[in-house]
Amino acid sequence: MKTAPRGYAKDHPRVGLLRHKGLTTWREWEPAAWLGTAKAKTRVVEFLRAGAPLHEWLDSHVRS
């Protein structure tokens, strides 16, 4: 976005962040044998659970 989203002041203190259209959480693992085992599911679930507080905060504080 070139300006603040609709409903926000153009001089909002966090206008730089408000102009983003998305947010991504990311984790990379080096290719290894464990990726073909049940351990892969465990690690992915741990990562998703670790991101849950961010998801909950966004759900509560960011307009859709």
Image: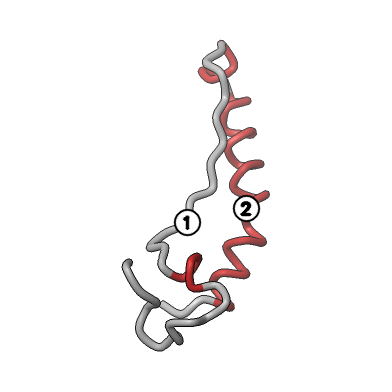
Q: Which residue shows up at 63% across the image and 34% down it?
A: 42
Q: Amino acid at mark 2?
A: Gly
Q: Nearer the viewer, residue 61 or 32?
A: 61
Q: Secondary structure at mark 1?
A: loop
Label 2 sits on a secondary structure element that is loop
CA neighbours of label 2 inside 10 A, class few (<14), some (14 to 19), many (20+): few
Q: Earlier in the sequence, mark 2 or mark 1?
A: 1
Q: Is residue 41 left or right of residue 18?
A: right
Q: What is the image's colouring?
A: secondary structure
- Residue at (59%, 47%) from the top-left corner? 48
| Residue 34 image offset from top left, x and y in percent | 59, 17
**Which residue type carries mark 1?**
Leu
Say left or right for 23 vs 51. left
* Disc on res. 23: 1
Q: CA distance from mark 2 to mark 1?
A: 12 Å
Q: Position of residue 7 (x, y in %)?
A: 40, 88
Question: What residue does disc 2 label?
Answer: 51
Residue 49 placement, left or right of 5:
right
Residue 25 in picture, x, y percent from top left: 54, 48
Tell me the residue at 57%/27% (across/down).
40
Say which residue appears at 66% left-offset and 41% top-offset. Answer: 46
Give the quadrant of the C terminus. bottom left
- The label nearer to you, 2 versus 1, is 1
